């Protein structure tokens, strides 16, 4: 199941953000193999997900109640 599908199936936006962040943790490791531009794109994506996570109502709202950032493509170096 894709990341988008797993996050969309989550019972609330807070859990969906956990899924999105934990699934992309590896992109921030220094030896992940992605280009520096790609690492930066994933950092931007993860920051946008954290904005949703910090919303006080995220635990009560569905993932569909939010506009989620687009997951960057993986570009390998």
Image: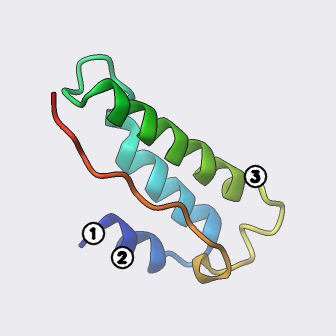
**Residue 5 x, y percent position in the rendering:** 36, 76
Task: Categorize mark 2 by other alpha carbons within 10 Å: few (<14), some (14-19), many (20+).
Answer: few
Task: Categorize mark 1 by other alpha carbons within 10 Å: few (<14), some (14-19), many (20+).
Answer: few
* Residue 42 located left or right of residue 45: left
- At x 63% / y 63%, what residue is drawn? 14
Q: Identify the residue under disc 1.
A: 2
Task: Categorize mark 3 by other alpha carbons within 10 Å: few (<14), some (14-19), many (20+).
Answer: few
Residue 52 location, quadrant: bottom right
* Marks 1 and 2 in Cβ contact (< 8 Å): yes
Q: Identify the residue under disc 3.
A: 54
> The N terminus appears in which quarter of the rendering?
bottom left
- At x 38% / y 70%, what residue is drawn? 4
* Marks 1 and 3 in Cβ contact (< 8 Å): no
Which residue reaches farthest front?
A: 37
Residue 19 location, quadrant: bottom left
SS category of the residue bearing label 3: helix
**Residue 55 x, y percent position in the rendering:** 79, 59
Q: Identify the residue under disc 2.
A: 5
* Marks 3 and 2 in Cβ contact (< 8 Å): no
> The C terminus appears in which quarter of the rendering?
top left
């Amino acid at each position: 199941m894709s990341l988008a599908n797993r996050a969309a199936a989550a019972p609330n936006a807070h859990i969906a953000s956990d899924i999105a962040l934990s699934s992309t943790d590896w992109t921030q490791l220094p030896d992940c193999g992605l280009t520096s531009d790609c690492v930066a794109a994933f950092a931007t994506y993860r920051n946008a997900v954290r904005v949703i996570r910090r919303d006080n109502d995220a635990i009560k709202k569905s993932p569909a109640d939010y506009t989620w950032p687009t997951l960057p493509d993986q570009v390998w170096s």
